[in-house]
Amino acid sequence: MIDPSSETIVRNPQDLLGAVPYLLGYHPGGEIVAVYLGAGQRILGVAAEPVRFSADALSGHLLLRAPAEPCAEIALIGYGPPPSRPVLAAIGRSLDLFWPLHALLWVTGSRCVCLLDGCSCPASRGMDIDPTPSPIATRLAVAGKVALPSRQALDTLVAPDLVAQAEAEGALAALAPDGDVPELFEDVLATVLRGHRLTAGQLAPLSLALTHPEVLETAWDAMCACMWQRDLWLDVTRRVPDRYVCGPATLAAWCAWLRGEHALATVACNRAVREGPGGRLTRLVTSVMRTHAPAHRLRRPTSH
């Protein structure tokens, strides 16, 4: 879930609060966040669940989302109005049966308070959250982690662009049959690597080609964690008509997963499945993501 090359050691509440948005991919709100810690207080993974669920349900979800690597401690952070604090306290009591609680923090706006009995951390009497990025947040940002302003902003990255979809429909209607797929991919990659966005005329044959499993798997084989691939497949996912979105959304999900952007990978995968039907590759990517395993621990699976 976390790149082991990143310096992700938690030393204080400010480290936790600064790291969470970059590890999730967005600034949480109305959610309970679990930060799973290994030996030496190294962050192993992070998970978030909406506060609207019951404490029992949230405890179960967060327990199941623990990383495969053994956890030494768990830090729980709630985001939202003060009346929801009892939910966090109840979750803390449940999960403390499995791992010692490193922190039990509640965040409302720019204020944080520790709910852990007997704790003497800086948040034990309440503290203002320093708006300056913490060192751990800075390192994660330099490593390419993105912290969008909200979960809604994350969803927007894969939401359909209705104007662009209409343009793609027009290009599809005028599309000549039997395009050369290898030449098509070379053209697409050359365009993107030059820093240009695909035209509707390039998008149309690409979206049609990706409906063929062998073409989709060719694109998947060429996948890397580069930012340009992330931007490419997210852009294609937003612009293609819904009936063609399964392939590019699957590629966008896998690229985000390779980059450690698990929340983005999940919303992209959900869009692929929702607009389905998905083929073998979509089912494979969905299954891998449900393991919550970090990309660096996976041998590259085969889609055959």
Image (cartoon, rainbow, N blue to C red):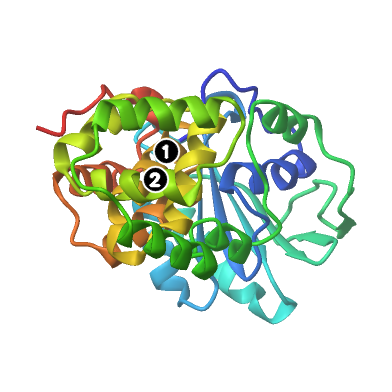
Q: Which residue is mark 2?
A: 253
**Quarter occupied by the C terminus:** top left
In the image, what residue occupies the spot 25% across and 32% down? 181
In the image, what residue occupies the spot 83% across and 39% down? 133
**Tag 2: Cα neighbours inside 10 Å, few (<14), some, or many (≥20)?**
many
Q: Amino acid at mark 1?
A: Trp
Answer yes or no: is residue 2 visible: no
Mark toward the viewer: 2 or 1: 2
**Disc 2 + disc 1, Cβ < 8 Å:** yes
In the image, what residue occupies the spot 35% across and 53% down? 269
User: Whole-percent x and y of residue 295?
Assistant: 38, 30
Q: Which residue is mark 1?
A: 257
Relative horizontal placement of residue 181, taking residue 255 as reference (left or right): left
Above or below residue 287? Residue 134 is above
**Quarter occupied by the N terminus:** top left
User: Whole-percent x and y of residue 134?
Assistant: 81, 36
Q: Nearer the viewer, residue 114 or 252?
A: 252
Above or below residue 223? Residue 74 is below
Total numbered circles: 2
Name the element at disc 2. Answer: helix
Relative horizontal placement of residue 183, taking residue 95 as reference (left or right): left
Relative horizontal placement of residue 258, taking residue 77 as reference (left or right): left
User: Whole-percent x and y of residue 37?
Assistant: 54, 36
Q: Residue furthest bottom?
A: 83
